[in-house]
C-alpha cells in the first residue's frame, strides 16, 4: 500500500505538472506560433498552487505571461522567483497599489481615467517606468472603459507617462452560450483598438479570449490568449491536472434502515458496509454532491450516502470486496480504468468546474508530480 503524504490527516491533492505542461503545449498548438499565451494563475492557480504552476509554466518555455487577480498575488510570485511578465487582471484600488505593482515589476490594469492619473503619479513619485494595460468594457458589465473613455485615458498616459501603456484587453462573458453576443463584444473591442491605437506611441498587446473563446473563435485571439481552464485540464479535450485523494478511516456493517449523516437524509435499503472518509466541503468536496456523487475505491464507484459534512463523508462500499481501513479513495480524478472528472462532478452538483479546485482549502496539502 502506498503511504499517504506526511501529516496525520490522509487527505491530499496530487497536481501533475507534466500534464499541465502537456496542456500548455496542446493549447499552443491550437493557436499557432504567432499568438502569445498568458497563463492565468489567479486564486492560487485555481487551487492548484500558484507558485508551483507558474514555475512549471516558466520552465516549459510555452508561456509568455502570467495573470493574477491582485498585486498581492503578483508580489507572491515574484518572491518565489517567477520572472515572467505578470498582468494584474483586477482593478487596482486603493490607487496606492500602483506603486507596489511598480516595485514588483507587475503590469497593472487601468480601468478608468482616475486610475490612469494615479498610475502616472505613482510613476513620477518613484522615478521609474511602470507598465499597464487598459481594460475595455464591451459587455461583461464589471470593470473597464468604453472606447471613447479608453482613448482619453490612453492620451493622458502617453502625455504624462510615455511608454507606460503597453496593451489593452477585454473579457468575453458568453463564449460558450452566445456566439452572437460574443461577436458583438469583439466588434466593440475592435472599435476600442482603433481608438486607442491611434493615440499610442508604440505597438500594443491586444487580448480578449480565455480558454473557450480562443478555441471556438479564431478572431478572438488577437495577439494573446488567456487560458486557465484548459491548462488545468478542466475543459474538454485537455488532460486533468489535479486528483483529490483520501483514505478510508472507519468501516462498519449496518442493518437495513440505518440513518446516515446530518438530517438523516439517507437510510440504508439493505444490510450495508459503510466507509467514512476524512474529506468534506471544507476540502472542495461540494455539499451538493450529498446522496448524488460517488468516490472510487479499489477501482469501483462507491456512492456518497448521507450529507457531506465539513470534514467527513460517508460512502457505501458494500460492493467492494475486501474494502478495509487505509484503502485509497479518489474523490476527483482517475483510479485504475475509472475516472470521476471534476467537470462531471461540478455539473452533477449544479456548479462550474472552477468551484471545486478553488474550494480546496490550505489544509489540503498539494503533492506535485513532475
Image (tube, rainbow, N blue to C red):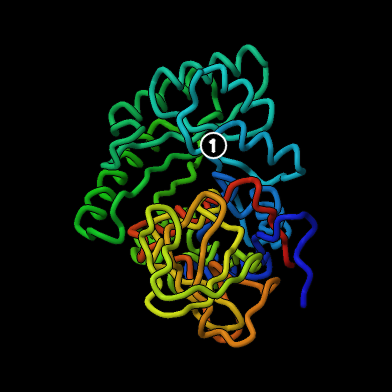
Q: Quadrant of residue 108?
A: top right
Rendered residue at 30%/61% (across/down): 176
Residue 61 or residue 337, whichever sits in front: 337
Which quadrant is the N terminus positioned in? bottom right
Residue 212 or residue 296, whichever sits in front: 296
Q: Quadrant of residue 142?
A: top left
Residue 240, compared with residue 108, is above or below; it is below
Pinpoint residue 172: horizontal percent, then vertical percent: 33, 49
Residue 53, compared with residue 215, is above or below; it is above
Can residue 229 be seen in the rendering of this structure?
Answer: yes
Tell me: 23 left or right of 135: right
Pinpoint residue 5: horizontal percent, then vertical percent: 77, 61
Pinpoint residue 8: horizontal percent, then vertical percent: 76, 55
Rendered residue at 55%/34% (across/down): 70
Q: Quadrant of residue 2?
A: bottom right
Which quadrant is the C terminus positioned in? bottom right
Residue 39 or residue 116, whichever sits in front: 39
Rendered residue at 35%/30% (across/down): 150
Q: Which residue is mark 1?
A: 88
Tell me: 238 left or right of 265: right
Can residue 58 be seen in the rendering of this structure?
Answer: no
Pinpoint residue 314: horizontal percent, then vertical percent: 51, 65
Q: Secondary structure at mark 1?
A: strand
Residue 281 or residue 129, whichever sits in front: 281
Rendered residue at 59%/87% (across/down): 321
Amino acid at each position: 500500500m502506498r503511504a499517504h503524504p506526511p501529516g496525520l490527516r490522509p487527505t491530499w491533492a496530487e497536481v501533475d505538472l507534466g500534464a499541465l505542461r502537456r496542456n500548455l503545449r496542446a493549447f499552443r498548438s491550437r493557436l499557432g506560433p504567432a499568438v502569445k499565451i498568458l497563463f492565468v494563475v489567479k486564486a492560487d492557480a485555481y487551487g492548484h498552487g500558484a507558485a508551483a504552476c507558474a514555475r512549471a509554466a516558466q520552465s516549459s518555455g510555452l508561456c509568455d505571461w502570467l495573470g493574477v487577480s491582485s498585486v498581492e498575488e503578483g508580489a507572491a510570485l515574484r518572491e518565489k522567483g517567477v520572472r515572467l511578465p505578470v498582468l494584474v487582471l483586477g482593478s487596482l484600488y486603493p490607487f496606492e497599489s500602483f506603486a507596489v505593482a511598480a516595485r514588483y515589476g507587475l503590469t497593472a490594469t487601468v480601468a478608468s481615467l482616475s486610475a490612469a492619473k494615479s498610475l502616472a503619479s505613482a510613476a513620477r513619485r518613484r522615478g521609474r517606468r511602470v507598465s499597464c494595460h487598459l481594460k475595455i468594457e464591451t459587455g461583461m458589465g464589471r470593470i473597464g472603459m468604453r472606447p471613447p473613455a479608453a482613448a482619453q485615458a490612453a492620451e493622458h498616459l502617453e502625455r504624462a507617462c510615455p511608454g507606460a501603456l503597453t496593451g489593452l484587453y477585454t473579457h468575453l462573458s458568453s463564449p460558450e452560450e452566445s456566439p452572437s453576443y460574443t461577436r458583438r463584444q469583439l466588434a466593440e473591442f475592435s472599435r476600442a483598438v482603433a481608438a486607442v491605437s491611434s493615440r499610442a506611441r508604440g505597438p500594443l498587446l491586444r487580448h480578449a479570449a480565455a480558454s473557450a473563446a480562443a478555441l471556438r473563435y479564431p478572431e478572438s485571439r488577437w495577439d494573446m490568449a488567456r487560458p486557465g481552464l484548459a491548462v488545468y485540464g478542466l475543459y474538454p479535450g485537455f488532460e486533468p491536472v489535479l486528483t483529490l485523494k483520501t483514505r478510508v478511516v472507519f468501516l462498519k456493517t449496518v442493518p437495513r434502515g440505518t440513518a446516515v449523516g446530518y438530517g438523516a437524509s439517507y437510510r440504508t435499503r439493505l444490510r450495508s458496509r459503510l466507509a467514512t472518509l476524512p474529506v468534506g466541503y471544507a476540502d472542495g468536496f461540494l455539499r451538493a454532491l450529498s446522496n448524488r456523487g460517488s468516490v472510487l475505491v479499489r477501482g469501483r464507484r462507491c456512492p456518497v450516502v448521507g450529507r457531506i459534512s465539513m470534514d467527513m463523508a460517508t460512502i457505501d462500499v458494500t460492493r467492494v470486496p475486501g474494502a478495509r481501513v487505509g484503502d485509497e479513495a479518489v474523490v476527483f480524478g482517475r483510479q485504475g480504468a475509472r475516472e470521476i472528472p471534476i467537470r462531471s462532478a461540478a455539473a452533477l452538483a449544479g456548479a462550474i468546474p472552477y468551484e471545486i479546485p478553488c474550494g480546496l482549502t490550505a489544509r489540503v496539502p498539494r503533492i506535485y508530480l513532475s
